[in-house]
Amino acid sequence: MNKEPEKGTNTPEPIWSDAYTICQNLQEGSVSSEKLMENIYERIESINPQINAIVNLLSKEEALALAKDSDKVSISERGPLHGLPMAPKDAVAVKGFPTTLGYKPFADKIETDDDQLAKRLRKAGAIFIGHTNMPEFGLGSNTFNSVFGTTCNPYDLSKSAGGSSGGSAAALATDMLPLADGSDMGGSLRNPASFCNVVGFRPSIGRMPKGLGAAWYGRLSTTGPMAKTVKDTAFLMSIISGEDRTDPLTLTDSEEDFLQAMIPYKIKSHNQLRVAISPCLGTLPVDSQVLEIIKSAGDTFKGIDAQITYIDPPLEGAMESFQIQRAVGLRGLGKMLDQSVKDWKKYAKDSTKWNIEKGLSLTIEEMIRAEIIRTNIYSSISTFFEDYDVLLLPSAQVPPFDLSNEWVKEIEGEKQKTYIDWMSVCCMISVTGLPAISVPGGFTNEGLPVGIQLVGKPRGDVELLKIAHLFESITNFYKIKPQFI
């Protein structure tokens, strides 16, 4: 039986229908930031104790004071996010707040400056009210840690909200925030979006400020936007993306390019949309209900006369490369912890220690091999996308799973070797560096959300968002909210 939260009798409805419209209202002054802040805090006070999505939360009095100050700013000086309450992921440094990374020794570490993502949000006028919860160091697609505890799935409190951006996804699903952000190494934007029936967009590597991470061409991680709809996701992307001169891989699409993605893809009569479908990337185990939803998504595209081809993309060695390059990054984390936290292993979860130790045991030959594999994959998949406009596959190999399990150990009878393997459907795509997005794709027989993952051409972020928007405009699964809100 699903464990559903109880709706508070005094929980007000959200005063926004979508993020883009409320931001326009705030910018033109037809809605006050104070009114929106009051509404959001009333919802947080009613819902968050059950979901545990937002952490490091300012007091209501502090937040309302910031909102009142925001309302005093002249209309002509207001940015696109003016007066909008936001809670960045707890990996994003925000001045005056602790950045805990879900790790107890960092619980009281107060930041003295914003990181690049926070600077862009603040410059646009956002008001920071806290952080969203994440697993320790963002490792694993189940949001729990020893600082703040577990984030529950809004559609069933006994299930996982996914991760590592689980707090962001759950806050969006319950209308405690209109917009959110996340980060993604092996699915941390896409997996929680799938589990919570929202949108998570992993941009091309170099599209966002580089933030945390290691290496140059070996980079796997990127930040990205999350929202309830593709339109709102594209809107936020227009604000937070852009050139970062400190990043050797930086890409430069303009704000106007991403605003264009707020309009769905239009199929030209002389040129069909070409959709490649790979339900299991060749041999990955995938839950039977997830497979049914992927088939249904394919039928949706077929229904608009898209050209459908069932084919697996060239990803030989992708998981090997991912595991090695992920461990390279965690090797750096281990060295940092050795220098900054006495007896750091005493506070870390077993999967964190295992992955760091794996990184420290790597040989130069393994690291070089991973880079060669990844380079070959990029070349092959770039050629693959000469014949297709988009690749369709699952965002997660399973529906939301029980919170009593730290990670998925078996799928359709096939045992998973590590806490990462059950996320391979996202990890393997991360290796390509291509843009990927999770969009609500349907529900299981038990009423649990399942997302579809769409992957775009090299540097084809804007076109991918338009195609995702087209699918969303036909299916409208995002309109199905958790019952208690």
Image: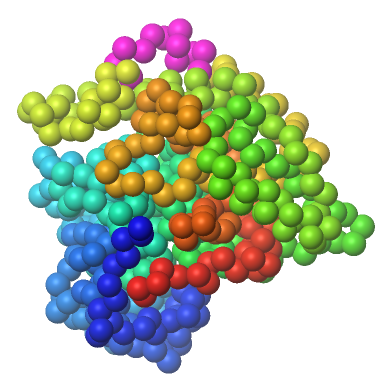
Does the magenta portion include 442?
A: no
Task: Quarter of the image for the N terminus: give it.
Answer: bottom left
Residue under the image location 11 percent in, 40 percent down: 105
- Residue depicted at x 22% and y 28%: 350
Residue 308, how many percent across, how many down?
A: 79, 47
Q: On screen, 419 above or below 123? A: above
Residue 369 in the image: x percent, y percent?
52, 13
Residue placed farthest to the front in the image?
1
Magenta region, main secondary structure: helix
Residue 441 figure quarter: bottom right
Residue 465 appears left or right of 267: left
Q: In this view of the protein, which residue sits in the foreground, 253 or 39?
A: 39
Pinpoint residue 176: horizontal percent, then vertical percent: 33, 71
Q: How many marks?
A: 0
Left or right: 467 in relation to 418: right
Tell me what residue is drawn at x 29 percent, y 67 percent.
5
Identify which residue is drawn at 68% across, 32% down.
313
Furthest toward the left, the residue is 342
Tell me the quadrant of the picture where the C terminus can be found. Answer: bottom left
Give percent across and percent down for residue 455. Answer: 63, 45
Horizontally, is 74 left or right of 219 in the view?
left
Residue 347 in view here = yes
Which residues, given as a range, are shown in magenta? 359-370
Q: Is residue 174 positioned above or below 163 on the image?
A: below
Which corner quadrant of the image does residue 255 belong to?
A: bottom right
367 within the magenta span? yes
Q: Is residue 156 above or below residue 84?
A: above
Q: How is the image coloured?
A: rainbow
Q: Is residue 240 visible?
A: no
Relative to 58, is 326 above or below? above
